[in-house]
Image: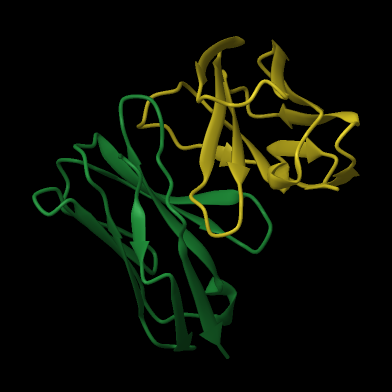
Chain colours: A green, B yellow
Amino acid sequence: SQQGEEDPQALSIQEGENATMNCSYKTSINNLQWYRQNSGRGLVHLILIRSNEREKHSGRLRVTLDTSKKSSSLLITASRAADTASYFCAPTGANNLFFGTGTRLTVIP
Amino acid sequence: ETGVTQTPRHLVMGMTNKKSLKCEQHLGHNAMYWYKQSAKKPLELMFVYSLEERVENNSVPSRFSPECPNSSHLFLHLHTLQPEDSALYLCASSQGTGGINEQFFGPGTRLTVL
Protein backbone atom coordinates (compact mmCIF):
# COMPACT_ATOMS: atom_id res chain seq x y z
CA SER A 1 0.00 0.00 0.00
CA GLN A 2 1.03 3.66 -0.23
CA GLN A 3 0.59 4.08 3.49
CA GLY A 4 3.45 5.50 5.50
CA GLU A 5 4.81 3.41 8.35
CA GLU A 6 6.46 5.36 11.13
CA ASP A 7 9.19 4.01 13.37
CA PRO A 8 9.52 3.93 16.32
CA GLN A 9 5.92 3.80 17.50
CA ALA A 10 6.91 5.72 20.63
CA LEU A 11 9.93 7.79 21.59
CA SER A 12 10.77 9.43 24.90
CA ILE A 13 13.65 11.92 25.24
CA GLN A 14 14.90 14.64 27.55
CA GLU A 15 14.33 18.28 26.71
CA GLY A 16 17.22 19.62 24.65
CA GLU A 17 17.97 16.30 22.96
CA ASN A 18 17.33 15.62 19.30
CA ALA A 19 14.47 13.38 18.16
CA THR A 20 14.59 11.31 14.99
CA MET A 21 11.54 9.62 13.52
CA ASN A 22 11.56 7.42 10.45
CA CYS A 23 9.01 6.65 7.78
CA SER A 24 8.94 3.90 5.19
CA TYR A 25 6.55 3.33 2.34
CA LYS A 26 6.09 0.75 -0.39
CA THR A 27 5.13 2.44 -3.67
CA SER A 28 6.36 5.35 -5.77
CA ILE A 29 5.35 8.75 -4.51
CA ASN A 30 5.00 12.29 -5.79
CA ASN A 31 5.84 13.97 -2.50
CA LEU A 32 5.92 13.24 1.20
CA GLN A 33 4.43 15.37 3.93
CA TRP A 34 4.93 15.34 7.70
CA TYR A 35 2.20 16.32 10.14
CA ARG A 36 1.99 16.72 13.88
CA GLN A 37 -0.99 15.97 16.13
CA ASN A 38 -1.44 17.04 19.71
CA SER A 39 -3.44 14.56 21.75
CA GLY A 40 -7.01 14.23 20.49
CA ARG A 41 -6.72 17.22 18.14
CA GLY A 42 -6.45 17.76 14.41
CA LEU A 43 -3.25 17.34 12.44
CA VAL A 44 -1.04 20.29 11.61
CA HIS A 45 1.15 20.35 8.52
CA LEU A 46 4.88 20.64 9.24
CA ILE A 47 6.75 20.25 5.99
CA LEU A 48 6.49 18.87 2.46
CA ILE A 49 9.41 17.35 0.59
CA ARG A 50 9.17 16.68 -3.12
CA SER A 51 10.29 13.41 -4.64
CA ASN A 52 13.24 15.13 -6.36
CA GLU A 53 14.50 16.67 -3.10
CA ARG A 54 16.82 14.92 -0.66
CA GLU A 55 16.71 17.25 2.31
CA LYS A 56 14.65 20.14 3.57
CA HIS A 57 14.82 22.36 6.62
CA SER A 58 12.25 24.40 8.49
CA GLY A 59 13.33 25.97 11.77
CA ARG A 60 14.31 23.12 14.10
CA LEU A 61 12.97 20.52 11.67
CA ARG A 62 15.07 18.63 9.17
CA VAL A 63 13.49 16.16 6.77
CA THR A 64 15.32 13.77 4.49
CA LEU A 65 13.96 11.64 1.68
CA ASP A 66 15.60 8.64 0.05
CA THR A 67 13.37 7.45 -2.78
CA SER A 68 15.69 4.54 -3.59
CA LYS A 69 15.09 3.16 -0.09
CA LYS A 70 11.52 4.44 0.04
CA SER A 71 12.18 6.11 3.35
CA SER A 72 12.11 9.50 5.02
CA SER A 73 13.21 10.84 8.37
CA LEU A 74 12.16 13.77 10.51
CA LEU A 75 14.71 15.26 12.87
CA ILE A 76 13.68 17.72 15.57
CA THR A 77 16.69 19.42 17.08
CA ALA A 78 16.92 20.88 20.59
CA SER A 79 13.57 19.43 21.56
CA ARG A 80 11.16 21.21 23.89
CA ALA A 81 8.38 19.93 26.11
CA ALA A 82 5.94 21.58 23.69
CA ASP A 83 7.13 19.22 20.95
CA THR A 84 5.32 16.38 22.73
CA ALA A 85 2.85 15.09 20.15
CA SER A 86 2.31 12.38 17.56
CA TYR A 87 4.09 12.77 14.25
CA PHE A 88 2.78 11.32 11.00
CA CYS A 89 4.33 10.93 7.62
CA ALA A 90 2.06 10.97 4.60
CA PRO A 91 3.43 9.73 1.29
CA THR A 92 1.36 11.37 -1.40
CA GLY A 93 0.09 9.93 -4.62
CA ALA A 94 -1.56 11.86 -7.40
CA ASN A 95 -4.45 12.96 -5.24
CA ASN A 96 -4.39 11.72 -1.70
CA LEU A 97 -2.23 11.49 1.37
CA PHE A 98 -1.66 8.11 2.99
CA PHE A 99 -1.12 8.46 6.70
CA GLY A 100 0.31 5.81 8.99
CA THR A 101 -0.21 5.26 12.70
CA GLY A 102 2.37 7.85 13.77
CA THR A 103 5.24 8.12 16.23
CA ARG A 104 4.29 9.26 19.69
CA LEU A 105 7.03 11.63 20.92
CA THR A 106 7.29 12.56 24.59
CA VAL A 107 9.77 15.26 25.58
CA ILE A 108 10.50 15.23 29.30
CA PRO A 109 11.19 18.67 30.84
CA GLU B 1 -7.56 25.70 14.29
CA THR B 2 -10.02 28.48 13.52
CA GLY B 3 -9.52 27.81 9.80
CA VAL B 4 -11.49 24.56 9.98
CA THR B 5 -14.14 24.11 12.64
CA GLN B 6 -16.05 20.99 13.60
CA THR B 7 -19.17 20.52 15.70
CA PRO B 8 -19.93 18.91 17.97
CA ARG B 9 -16.56 18.23 19.58
CA HIS B 10 -17.91 15.24 21.48
CA LEU B 11 -20.88 13.02 20.67
CA VAL B 12 -22.31 9.98 22.42
CA MET B 13 -25.01 8.11 20.59
CA GLY B 14 -26.86 4.84 20.70
CA MET B 15 -26.85 2.41 17.82
CA THR B 16 -30.35 3.38 16.75
CA ASN B 17 -29.80 7.15 16.79
CA LYS B 18 -29.35 9.46 13.82
CA LYS B 19 -26.89 12.31 14.18
CA SER B 20 -24.82 14.57 11.96
CA LEU B 21 -21.28 15.91 12.18
CA LYS B 22 -20.62 19.35 10.76
CA CYS B 23 -17.45 20.81 9.32
CA GLU B 24 -16.89 24.36 8.10
CA GLN B 25 -13.77 25.79 6.51
CA HIS B 26 -13.01 29.51 6.38
CA LEU B 27 -9.97 29.24 4.11
CA GLY B 28 -11.54 29.53 0.68
CA HIS B 29 -10.50 25.99 -0.21
CA ASN B 30 -12.26 23.89 -2.83
CA ALA B 31 -11.63 20.38 -1.47
CA MET B 32 -12.82 18.81 1.75
CA TYR B 33 -12.21 15.44 3.40
CA TRP B 34 -13.52 13.18 6.12
CA TYR B 35 -11.04 10.95 7.98
CA LYS B 36 -11.58 8.37 10.71
CA GLN B 37 -8.92 7.94 13.38
CA SER B 38 -9.13 4.86 15.58
CA ALA B 39 -6.64 3.90 18.25
CA LYS B 40 -3.53 2.17 16.90
CA LYS B 41 -4.79 2.26 13.31
CA PRO B 42 -3.67 4.42 10.40
CA LEU B 43 -5.69 7.50 9.71
CA GLU B 44 -8.41 6.30 7.35
CA LEU B 45 -9.60 8.48 4.47
CA MET B 46 -13.38 8.14 4.16
CA PHE B 47 -14.60 10.70 1.63
CA VAL B 48 -13.16 13.38 -0.63
CA TYR B 49 -15.11 16.26 -2.14
CA SER B 50 -13.72 18.54 -4.81
CA LEU B 51 -15.78 21.53 -5.96
CA GLU B 52 -18.71 20.03 -4.04
CA GLU B 53 -18.59 16.78 -6.02
CA ARG B 54 -17.66 13.53 -4.31
CA VAL B 55 -14.49 12.25 -5.95
CA GLU B 56 -13.62 9.39 -3.65
CA ASN B 57 -15.45 7.01 -1.38
CA ASN B 58 -13.14 4.46 0.15
CA SER B 59 -15.56 1.56 0.67
CA VAL B 60 -17.20 3.23 3.63
CA PRO B 61 -20.35 1.52 5.01
CA SER B 62 -23.61 3.12 3.96
CA ARG B 63 -24.42 4.00 7.57
CA PHE B 64 -22.06 6.95 6.95
CA SER B 65 -23.54 9.43 4.48
CA PRO B 66 -21.62 12.58 3.49
CA GLU B 67 -23.11 15.80 2.21
CA CYS B 68 -21.34 18.82 0.76
CA PRO B 69 -23.88 21.59 0.09
CA ASN B 70 -21.19 24.16 -0.81
CA SER B 71 -17.43 24.48 -0.82
CA SER B 72 -17.33 25.71 2.78
CA HIS B 73 -19.49 23.09 4.47
CA LEU B 74 -19.27 19.34 4.85
CA PHE B 75 -21.54 17.05 6.81
CA LEU B 76 -21.33 13.43 7.85
CA HIS B 77 -24.74 11.92 8.56
CA LEU B 78 -24.69 8.95 10.88
CA HIS B 79 -27.36 6.28 11.37
CA THR B 80 -27.51 2.83 12.95
CA LEU B 81 -23.83 2.91 13.86
CA GLN B 82 -21.91 0.12 15.51
CA PRO B 83 -19.68 0.32 18.61
CA GLU B 84 -16.62 -0.18 16.38
CA ASP B 85 -17.47 3.12 14.72
CA SER B 86 -16.37 4.90 17.88
CA ALA B 87 -13.40 7.05 16.86
CA LEU B 88 -12.15 10.57 16.28
CA TYR B 89 -13.63 11.93 13.05
CA LEU B 90 -11.48 14.56 11.42
CA CYS B 91 -12.43 16.98 8.69
CA ALA B 92 -9.81 18.61 6.49
CA SER B 93 -9.70 21.01 3.58
CA SER B 94 -7.18 21.95 0.91
CA GLN B 95 -6.86 24.05 -2.20
CA GLY B 96 -7.11 21.33 -4.82
CA THR B 97 -6.88 17.60 -4.25
CA GLY B 98 -3.40 17.03 -5.60
CA GLY B 99 -0.81 15.43 -3.37
CA ILE B 100 1.20 18.63 -3.44
CA ASN B 101 -1.42 20.41 -1.39
CA GLU B 102 -1.23 20.90 2.35
CA GLN B 103 -4.34 19.78 4.18
CA PHE B 104 -5.75 21.83 7.03
CA PHE B 105 -7.50 19.82 9.73
CA GLY B 106 -10.25 20.63 12.16
CA PRO B 107 -10.01 19.61 15.82
CA GLY B 108 -12.20 16.55 15.29
CA THR B 109 -15.37 15.10 16.75
CA ARG B 110 -14.86 12.37 19.34
CA LEU B 111 -17.69 9.90 18.68
CA THR B 112 -18.71 7.19 21.11
CA VAL B 113 -21.31 4.64 20.03
CA LEU B 114 -22.94 2.75 22.87
Tell me what residue is drawn at x 23 percent, y 37 percent. A29
Q: Residue furthest left?
A: A68
Q: Is residue B32 left or right of residue B6?
A: left
Q: Is residue A77 left or right of residue B53?
A: left
Q: Is residue B48 left or right of residue A48?
A: right
Percent across and percent down for residue A83 are 53, 72
Label total for image: 0
Tell me what residue is drawn at x 42 percent, y 32 percent. B101
Q: Residue B92, located in which quarter of the rendered image?
A: top right
Q: Is residue B58 visible?
A: yes
Percent across and percent down for residue B105 are 61, 41
Q: Is residue A23 above or below residue B50?
A: below
Is the N terminus of chain A in the top left, top right, bottom left or bottom right quadrant?
top left
Q: Is residue B73 visible?
A: no
Is the C terminus of chain A in the top left, top right, bottom left or bottom right quadrant?
bottom right
Tell me what residue is drawn at x 41 percent, y 82 percent. A78
Q: Is residue B13 above or below residue B26?
A: below
Tell me what residue is drawn at x 59 percent, y 37 percent. B35
Q: Residue B100, located in which quarter of the rendered image?
A: top left
Percent across and percent down for residue B77 are 78, 24
Tell which of B44 and A87 is nearer to you.
B44
